[in-house]
Image (tube, helix red, strand yellow):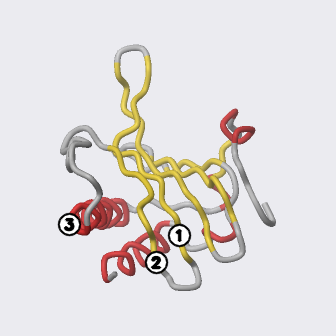
Amino acid sequence: MDLCDENYRQLMRIAPALRMLCGYHISRIEGCMDLHLEIKEQTPYTTLVHLTYFFPYRKEQRSDPDALLRVYHDSRQVEVMTLKQRVLPLNGGKEPATLVQKWRVNLFLSKWLNYCVEQGHGFDQNSLQPSALQSKLKVVGSC
């Protein structure tokens, strides 16, 4: 639970107005990878977000790490719904989800969010991007 609390605090440092954001956002820092945030769903108490980097790979782009996160604003927690990353696979999909596995995933997210904060990444209304992805969004609530 402490990691979920810490992940919430770190995410709020990156996107302090997360509850007000909609759509697809990019944080650009000179000399760093662009950080992508997509608001998948907004409800009165939760936000579902997709957070990733895109790396060039042959003629396409690959997302890595690639996280789907449910943010619980009332309890100030972040739950990792899915986390995919290729460089340091957490379990290779061979183990069923356990408490240890969930702890590993949340620890990875904590370190990644901390790294993003240290780089100076941030999302607000100015980071909103016009995107074809917005038409695919499932947004509930005020967005």
Amino acid type of the residue that numbered disc 2 sits on in the rendered structure: Gln
Q: Earlier in the sequence, mark 3 or mark 2?
A: 2
Residue 28, x across and y down, in percent: 48, 48
Instruction: Name the residue that disc number 2 marks.
Output: 77
Residue 110 placement (x, y as % from top left)? 30, 67
Q: CA distance from mark 3 to mark 2?
A: 18 Å
Residue holding disc 1: 71
Q: Give the Cα distance between marks 2 and 1.
A: 6 Å
Q: Residue at x 34, y 81 (%)?
A: 1
Neighbour tally class for label 1: few under 14, some 14-19, many 20 plus, Cα within 10 Å: many
Q: Toward which corner of the image does residue 7 lie, by quadrant?
A: bottom left
Residue drawn at x 47%, y 67% is 14
Which element type, helix, strand or loop, lies under badge 2? strand
Q: Are marks 2 and 1 in contact (CB under 8 Å)?
A: yes
The quadrant holding residue 84 is top left
Q: Identify the disc placed on residue 119.
A: none
- Label 3 with label 1: CB-CB less than 8 Å: no
The amino acid type of the residue labelled 3 equals Val
